[in-house]
Image (cartoon, helix red, strand yellow):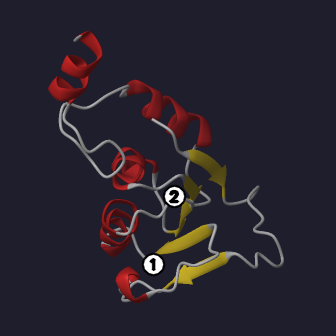
Amino acid sequence: MSIELFSAADFQAPEVEARRLVLANDADPREADLNGIDVVELQFPKFVDGRAFSQAFLLRRRLGFAGQIRATGDVLIDQLVQMARSGFTQAVLRADQDLAHGRRLLAHYPAFYQGDAVQAAPLFVRDTATTV
């Protein structure tokens, strides 16, 4: 599972990231101008607010956004697997979260049976395609 993790203490967004778009939680990504954008930053204002998952899915699957999708805010390691499956490529963990534990958690799940935002085909289709 490919998602780059950062601790809150170590992460420093560039002072000026001209090709970055920060979307508010209530923004519809379908209305955003993604031309020239390399990084879309999605906010988790609190753990129970999961709208950024839907935004990431829309960006990846429906809009075909190929750049980085970064999770910031109240990001817990419990959310990482779902973030990766929803299309996130980077996550800045909340200050009290263990970076090493997050990496181990992501390595624990090498594949999923169902399709997701990143890999649309279910596992049985992918396995059949490689063995035929």
As helix, strand or loop, the secondary structure at mark 1 comes to loop
Near-viewer residue (63 or 88): 63
As helix, strand or loop, the secondary structure at mark 2 comes to loop
What percent of the width, then of the height, locates residue 57?
33, 63
Q: Farthest front residue?
A: 132
Residue at the (82%, 79%) spot, across then down: 16
What type is the residue that disc 2 sits on? Ala
| Left or right placement of residue 62 versus residue 83 in this view | left
Residue at the (41%, 55%) spot, across then down: 87
What percent of the width, then of the height, locates residue 68?
58, 59
| Left or right placement of residue 58 versus residue 16 in this view | left
Specify the quadrant of the image occupied by residue 10. bottom right
For marks 2 and 1, give the CA distance. 24 Å
Q: Which residue is mark 1?
A: 45
Residue at the (66%, 75%) spot, across then down: 20
Specify the quadrant of the image occupied by residue 12. bottom right
Q: How packed is label 1: few (under 14 Cα within 10 Å), some, or many (20 or more)?
A: some
Q: Earlier in the sequence, mark 2 or mark 1?
A: 1
Q: Quadrant of the N terminus?
A: top left
What percent of the width, then of the height, locates residue 127?
23, 19
Q: How packed is label 2: few (under 14 Cα within 10 Å), some, or many (20 or more)?
A: few
What type is the residue that disc 1 sits on? Pro
Q: Which residue is mark 2?
A: 66
Image height of 78 relative to 109, above or below: below
Specify the quadrant of the image occupied by residue 119. top left
Q: Quadrant of the C terminus?
A: top left
Residue 62's label in the rendered image is: none
